[in-house]
Amino acid sequence: MEEDKAFGYWNYYSDDFDWNESPRLDVENKQDTLELFKGNGINETEANHLWESGYVCPKGLDIVIDRYYGGVLSSCDTVSRLKPSQLRELFDSPKSRAWVKTASSLDDVHRIVEDTQSRLSRPILFRGQRQNYFIDREINNPYFTIDGLGEISILSSFWRKVFANTKSSFLDFQTLTLFEWSKIFYTAFDLEEIEKRHKIAIDNGEWIHSIQDMADSDDPLLKEFGNHRLDIAMGMDFNLADTLSTLLQHYGLLSTVIDLTASLDVAIFFATHKYTSSNGVSNYEFVGTNDGKSVLYLIRGSDQEMVTHENDLVLNKIPPERPQRQHCVISKSSPFAVNLPAFFLEGIINLEFELDETESPKKTHDLFPNEEEDKFLGALRRGISQPDKVSYFG
């Protein structure tokens, strides 16, 4: 039966998964790329360090891509995608644009944010963390490396797991199957009633042997369910793709997107709370500003690379509350742009002040409602084959 098959997505959780599976887009073999580097004045040691650090040449493109930011585009931006002859120029003139500021109070935080927004034409997005994390590679990209600090890492859960196993993988991400997504979304309907009406329609001479047939049915419930099935099947790899990735991310499952927020208060929550899990129940424990190590990232919004979550028609019957309450905006990534949110990093605010829990603008239950309030959470836990992987706050 279909439901007994091993779903590709869940292989990512297996200890013996091959993280070096062949991707759809080939990378030039290492030796050819090294020769290209050396032909442009780079010695063999540096050429090897560049390759191992993620500076690669996709087949068919006469271009060097920094896989942390570049994306598979044939154009050059001279910082993440450049001609081999431009490599020296990149490393000869470091020019990171991101700033670092220190806040001594919540009022300071608001003042810095307001001042920054007044100078930008794009809206600011936020990400709160209990500390900075950095890209670990031999040769950092100077355009994204902050002097005295490092190259900020904003990797998704999927790419963190990939790189924990191997840094040479260009694996294509595979989401849940259509079968499993359908099981989740079908919980919005009374399937026994639909089966009953389906049989009656067939007995009455209706021809219902495909999803489209059901969408064209005279029975209003069958018609609604048929259109719902069509929306999922037709949109899964297209208009629904970002929505599905958002849902994986916000419910604790591996995904290739990073969750940002349009709400400063939400970002402050994540900068001042530590995630814990015990006996299958998750929690966020207040830790204040983590001895002054907590940070807020201010990120320039991008219509091309970032998507604001909205409850579309497929979600209306079981609306997911977490992304709504967290004012979610996701940033995309790909095997050739794994650290893409950091491309848009405007600045970092260090929270170097004491914060009492009563001053925290958000509480855990504000952002992580239970199954009674969050219908999608219940549907997800009932619909997937490994419900224990969902972060559950009881």
Image (cartoon, rainbow, N blue to C red):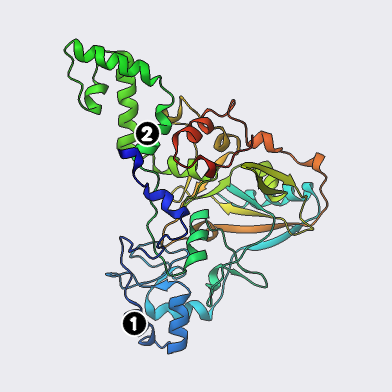
- Percent x, y of residue 176: 40, 44
- Percent x, y of residue 234: 30, 36
- Percent x, y of residue 61: 30, 70
Query: Which residue type carries mark 2?
Result: Ser
Residue 222 drawn above or below residue 136: above
Q: Which residue is mark 1?
A: 31
> How many residues crowd around disc 2 within 10 Å: few (fewer than 14), some, or many (20 or more)?
some
Q: Which mark is residue 182?
A: 2
Is disc 2 in contact with disc 1, using a CB cutoff of under 8 Å? no
- Percent x, y of residue 177: 36, 42
State the image quarter where residue 198 is shown. Answer: top left
* Image position of 204 (left or right of 389): left
Taking depth in this image into account, of 195 and 185 the one nearest to the observer is: 195
Residue 218 makes an appearance in the image? no
Residue 311 makes an appearance in the image? yes
Give the label, 2 or 1, closer to the camera: 2
| Labels 2 and 1: the sequence-earlier one | 1
Mark 1 residue element:
helix
Q: Residue at x 46, y 87 (%)?
A: 45
State the image quarter where residue 245 is shown. Answer: top left
Q: Residue at x 49, y 50 (%)?
A: 254
Mark 2 residue element:
helix
> How many residues crowd around disc 1 within 10 Å: few (fewer than 14), some, or many (20 or more)?
few
Q: Report the Cα–Cα distance between label 2 and label 1.
A: 45 Å
Q: Residue at x 61, y 49 (%)?
A: 126
Q: Residue at x 53, y 33 (%)?
A: 377
- Which quadrant of the figure contains the C terminus? top right
Taking depth in this image into account, of 355 and 183 the one nearest to the observer is: 183
Query: Which residue type carries mark 1?
Result: Gln
